[in-house]
Structures are given as structure tokens and as C-alpha cells.
Amino acid sequence: MEKLQKIILILIGYIIFALIIVGIEAIVAIQLKANITAMYIKMNIVYTLLIYSILNTIFWGINYISNYKTVKKLNNALKNIQKKGEKNEK
């Protein structure tokens, strides 16, 4: 169930990201008096997917490193507390 939630979250995030990109392209095209075609937008889906995948990988990597450092600090603090507890028992 947890993996399904992650997959759904990724899909929703990609859809929102793609809509933002398409919206920006539409605004720019309207400002430049250009015509937007569905084919042009479909071609950009590959690029938005690539950009979104790269951004997700970067953010997940940063999150993983941050969590790893936090867990490492907490484990060290727990070991120190356990050592103090053993000294007090003696």
C-alpha cells in the first residue's frame, strides 16, 4: 500500500509539473503571438518527464542524505545514553 501511495504521489506530481510547464509555454506563446499545437505540447512531454525525473532524483537524494545524517546522530546519542545508563547501574 505504501508503494502504491508513492507511485500515485509521483504521478500526481508529474501531472502538476507538466501542467505548469504547459501553462508557461502557453503564456509565452500568447505573448509572442505564436500558435500552440497539440503536437508541440506532446513533444515537450518527454522533456518535462526527463526534467521532472532529474529533479525528483535530486530532491530524493538530498532527503536521503539528510535522513541518513539525522539517524546517524540519533544513533550516536542513543549509544551515549546507553553508556551512561550502564555506568549508573554499576
Image: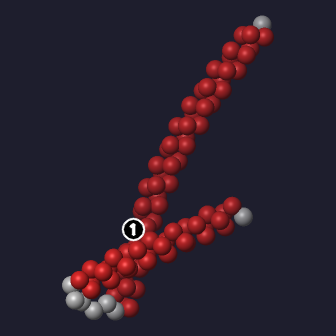
- Quadrant occupied by the C terminus: top right
Relative to 22, 68 lies left or right: right
| Residue for point 50% across, 44% down | 65
In the rendered view, would you say 47 is above or below 40? above
Where is residue 18, by image quadrant? bottom left
Quadrant of the image for the N terminus?
bottom right
Q: Which secondary structure lies at badge 1?
A: helix
User: How many C-alpha atoms fall within 10 Å of the one at disc 1: few (<14), some, or many (≥20)?
Assistant: some
Number of marks in the rendered image: 1
Of residues 17 and 39, the one nearer the viewer is 17
Amino acid on which disc 1 is placed: Ile
For this view, does 89 lie left or right of residue 73?
Answer: right
What residue is rendered at 60% in x and 27% in y?
76
Q: Which residue is mark 1?
A: 51
Q: Quadrant of residue 17?
A: bottom left
Q: Residue at x 55, y 37 (%)?
A: 70
Residue 27 position within the rendered picture, expressed as x and y whole percent measured from the top left? 30, 80
**In which quarter of the view is residue 45 placed?**
bottom left
